């Protein structure tokens, strides 16, 4: 394994960030290559834990000459977001300077040629230069896994519809409970930026059996522990072996994903009509009937007449809940996977 440290100058003199890039050179230039990154949202650590335990497995494979395809890993993809603390709290999702979501507004290229992207020392903000650099690192690979997590959540994947059904193997390898499929835009999330050049190719030339591009939602913010990290590392390793990036005769994968594949428009985003305390009636993984109580927002503590109880717009499965228990008016409370289009459906990514 080779470690490369890429330095990006800050936007004012006297400071910089460092991006740590870990590379394994494959023995077979025809083998599938893979790029994995974690913590683009700085406070999302389950993927970082998975990579922490995956790397020794890959180093062992490297020592034994079993790395077939090139592998590039960036365990901490966003040193800017990792360093954002305010009033003793870590805030890694939105950039302090612009309030922009770190996983939106990536450049959408029509080809795999990255020469037009802003260079490391170009006249753009650090966040824009970082996005360009991550894209330069990722795009040469057949497989791009961007490891994130939700608030409180099941283990699920975002996948563009064009990459299905070929990517059911990833869902099987990771034990994902659901796939959220999209086909229009994801507001130029990293995943969309990596899928975009593939989708510009004619259908017959996309070579989808080699490719995988996804946002992995490795459960919730607090699902960071040794056992889960090791299990997720084994899942990622199983997938890499299945795709021939690493060879390991001891590892096999049965592609038996049976979870729902839910178009984004069928996801019910339940939002708070007013601000207040959140009292959930359901937990993640629950199957609910249409009309079932989901959550009560307490707007006047001590006075039940101020309670607002929200019910399921359609039957489905509770995929995620917010991890906080105090909401603002209009904010997301939970995601319910339905089987028909949500009346609230709108184009683009599900949340801010
Ligand atoms: Zn994220």
Image (cartoon, grey):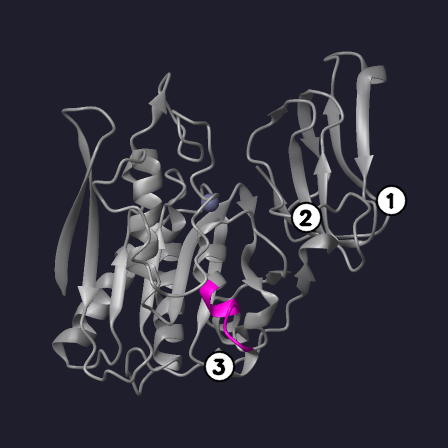
Q: Nearer the viewer, mark 2 or mark 1?
A: 2
Viewport quadrant of the C terminus: top right
Viewport quadrant of the N terminus: bottom left
Instruction: Magenta stretch: give its range.
Output: 197-202
Pick whichever of labels 2 and 3 is earlier in the sequence. 3
Instruction: Decide whether residue 18 is among the magenta residues.
Output: no
Q: Is residue 140 above or below residue 335?
A: below
Q: Furthest residue to the front?
A: 116
Q: In this view, does 176 lie to the left or right of 237?
A: right
Name the foreground residue: 76 vs 137. Answer: 137
Q: Where is residue 259 in the image (x, y as percent from the top left)?
A: 64, 67
Q: Name the residue under label 3.
A: 205
**Mark 3, secondary structure of its residue:** helix
Q: Where is residue 168 in the image (x, y as percent from the top left)?
A: 55, 74
**Mark 2, secondary structure of its residue:** loop
Q: Mark 2 points at which residue?
A: 347
Q: Name the residue under label 1.
A: 291
């Amino acid at each position: 394994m080779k470690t490369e440290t890429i330095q990006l100058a800050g936007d004012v003199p006297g400071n910089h960030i460092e991006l740590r890039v870990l590379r394994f050179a494959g023995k077979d230039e025809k083998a599938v290559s893979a790029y994995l990154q974690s913590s683009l949202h700085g406070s999302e650590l389950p993927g970082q834990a998975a990579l922490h335990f995956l790397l020794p497995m890959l180093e062992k494979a490297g020592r034994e000459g079993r790395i077939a395809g090139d592998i590039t890993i960036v365990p901490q993809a966003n040193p800017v977001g990792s360093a954002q603390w305010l009033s003793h709290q870590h805030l890694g999702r939105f950039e302090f300077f612009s309030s922009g979501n770190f996983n939106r507004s990536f450049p959408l290229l029509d080809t795999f040629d990255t020469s037009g992207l802003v260079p490391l020392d170009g006249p753009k903000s650090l966040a824009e230069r970082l996005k360009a650099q991550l894209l330069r690192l990722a795009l040469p690979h057949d497989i791009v896994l961007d490891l994130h997590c939700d608030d409180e959540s099941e283990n699920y994947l975002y996948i563009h519809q064009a990459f299905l059904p070929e990517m059911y193997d990833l869902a099987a390898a990771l034990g994902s409970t659901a796939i959220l499929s999209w086909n229009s835009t994801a507001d130029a999330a990293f995943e969309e930026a990596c899928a975009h050049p593939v989708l510009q190719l004619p259908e017959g030339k996309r070579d989808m059996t080699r490719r995988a591009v996804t946002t992995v939602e490795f459960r919730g913010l607090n699902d960071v522990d040794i056992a889960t990290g090791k299990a997720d590392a084994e899942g990622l390793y199983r997938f890499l072996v299945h795709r021939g990036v690493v060879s390991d005769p001891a590892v096999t994968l049965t592609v038996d994903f049976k979870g729902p594949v839910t178009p984004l428009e069928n996801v019910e985003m339940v939002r708070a009509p007013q601000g207040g305390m959140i009292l959930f009636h359901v937990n993640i993984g629950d199957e609910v009937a249409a009309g079932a109580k989901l959550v009560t927002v307490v707007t006047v503590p001590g006075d039940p007449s101020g309670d607002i109880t929200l019910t399921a717009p359609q039957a489905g499965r509770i995929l995620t809940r917010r991890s906080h228990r105090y909401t603002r008016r209009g904010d997301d409370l939970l995601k319910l996977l339905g089987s028909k289009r949500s009346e609230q459906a709108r184009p683009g990514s599900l949340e801010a």
